[in-house]
Amino acid sequence: MRVIVDEDKCCGAGQCVLLAPKVFDQRDDGIVILLDESPAKELHTVVREAATVCPAAAIRLEENE
């Protein structure tokens, strides 16, 4: 899995950080910071959920399976 974030789309809701804090963080202004663009397999489920619940659709996933 490869994670791609579009900071310009991010609205700072923070759902991604709550779901997958090992993969996402936030700047002081709330915009997403990608910590790990190739997360470990055990994190794939929560990363998929984070992408699904992102209200701005700022997270895109490329599956390498």
Image (cartoon, rainbow, N blue to C red):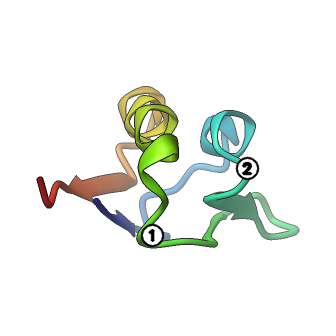
Going 17% across and 54% down the picture, which residue do you hit? 63
Place of residue 35 in the rendered image (x, y in percent of width and height, measured from the top left): 63, 72
Q: Nearer the viewer, mark 1 or mark 2?
A: 2
Residue 28 lies, with reference to residue 10, above or below; the image says below
Q: Spatial distance from mark 1 to mark 2, Cα to Cα?
A: 20 Å
Q: Quadrant of residue 33?
A: bottom right
The residue nearer to you, when weighing 60 against 63, is: 63
Residue under pointer 2: 21
**Quarter of the image that includes the N terminus:** bottom left
The residue nearer to you, when weighing 9 against 61, is: 61
Residue 13 lies, with reference to residue 63, above or below; the image says above
Total numbered circles: 2
Name the secondary structure under disc 1: loop
Going 60% across and 42% down the picture, which residue do you hit? 16
Earlier residue among tags 1 and 2: 1
Going 51% across and 34% down the picture, which residue do you hit? 46
Place of residue 49 in the rendered image (x, y in percent of width and height, measured from the top left): 44, 29
Residue under pointer 1: 8
